[in-house]
Image (cartoon, rainbow, N blue to C red):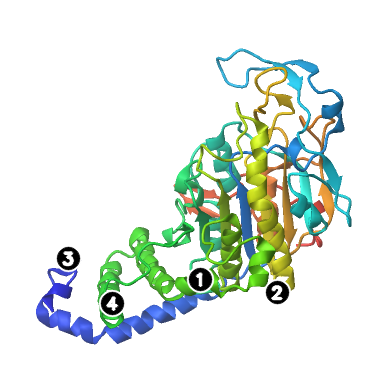
Amino acid sequence: MSDLLPAAATDVDRRRFLAACAGTLAAAAVGTQQREAAATPIAPHFAPQAKHVVVLYMSGGYSHVDTFDPKPLLTEKHNQTIGSELAAAVSGQPKNERFLKAPLWKFRPNQECGTEVSDLFPHLRDVMHEVALIRSMHTDHRDHGEATLQLHTGSTGFATPGLGAWLSYGLGTFNPNLPAHVVISEHRPYNGPQIWDASFLPGVHSGVQIQPGDEPLPNLTPASPRPLQELELGLLDQLNRKHLERRRDDRNLASRMQSFQTAKGLQDLAPQVLDLSRESKHTLDLYGSKPGDKTSYAAQCIMARRLIENGVRFVEIIDAVGACRDNWDAAHRDVGTHAKYAKRVDQPIAGLIRDLKQRGLFDDVLLVFCTEFGRSPWAQDGKGTKSRTHHPSAFSCWLAGGGIKPGIVHGATDEIGNYVAEDAVHVHDFHATILHVLGLDHTKLTYRYSGRDFRLTDVHGHVVNGVLRNSAG
């Protein structure tokens, strides 16, 4: 029996240990009550228009002028110069002369709403009547790390809580046995786990990473027989509670205790939720998946839908074929590689929209399709070259689902897609709008840390009412 005693409890004598074991059932009952309490959603600031968020993040920065923002003038004036850069793109480097570069794919309209999308995304084009396309996005930094950080956390300078962590903190979870915040990431993105970390928020709000494959989450199979594990966890919980009573301000200990409860819930429920063998052939065909597929982007989209169905508040799918070296980045690379990445995600995302609609879930879920910045309208490496450089001044993202006005285009760029010309939407505005759809006022969702009140949008941000069905809040 002494072999069961955790190292942290070596000062507990045999009699106290036996008493602890006797109290295991009571401790487990308390733990269950806590998990049930955590499952109760926290009241939003006002009536939400969606309950869940699924972020479809295209890592690396796709080219807006090759995907969602048609610019006929680029084709008309292909290889013509617009002069040198006003300032070197990177400090210390010479200014380059800019030669316009035509898009590699033809743009065609959606048959119902007329929104033009390139042939890179034929399946997405067919569902654009469900989407509010924002062509006037802009951000503050041109480097992947900083721009990725801002797209997720609002900050370019240092890691603060990510969007999923703020939503978990602000609204709680629907299911005590699953985390509120899940990230499906096959490869390590720019900044790694910083972009889904809770930072100074309680650790329970950090994202739980799922890696598609045979073992999407490590250690899901209990190391001990289940009855013995219940005894061990009950004792651990009781000892931690006594420890916490003397250290009531120890947020790290409280978060670790909650993480044990979440881990136990994952062991119980995650294998069922992530088991795609339960999906019908019709559903697999809709997403472009096949029986036995566990890793494709289609499989990841189905996982996201299953997680949402089982009460997860926030799911992000980070798309990258091979981490930072094999993603949408077209700097000093052939922008034609976009075809590989688009083929990977096009049908699955369109399938997700259709699947949510046929299940009656579309109005409960806010879909967010985004990237960290756009691509330059000119060839990066000189006349006739194949690459497009990073372009934070203008890019395109879209929203769909709960609370979103379907089939519209918001904002516009200039005639070559270089700058925002109408209805600019900064990343802070994008975040404010997402929070608004979930019933949260971005100016009131704050957390006091290190002597000041922090929020996702810092001291910025305006709700983009033009993309909302009902802008009253």
Q: Which mark is residue 229?
A: 4
Residue identified by numbered label 3: 7
Q: Local crowd at mark 3 within 10 Å, few (<14), some, or many (≥20)?
A: few
Q: Amino acid under label 2? A: Arg
Quadrant for the C terminus in the image: bottom right
Q: Amino acid under label 4? A: Gln
> Is residue 332 visible in the rendered structure shown here?
yes
Q: Give the CA separation, mark 1 to mark 2.
A: 19 Å
- Closer to the N terminus: mark 3 or mark 2? 3
Return the x and y of residue 40 as percentages of the image width and height.
Answer: 54, 75
Residue identified by numbered label 1: 275
Q: Amino acid under label 3? A: Ala
Residue name at image x 35 percent, y 58 percent: 252
Relative side of 329 to 84, left or right? left
Relative side of 364 to 164, left or right? right
Return the residue nearer the eye: 218 or 154.
Answer: 218
Q: Give the CA separation, mark 4 to mark 3.
A: 16 Å
Q: Local crowd at mark 1 within 10 Å, few (<14), some, or many (≥20)?
A: some
Residue identified by numbered label 2: 359
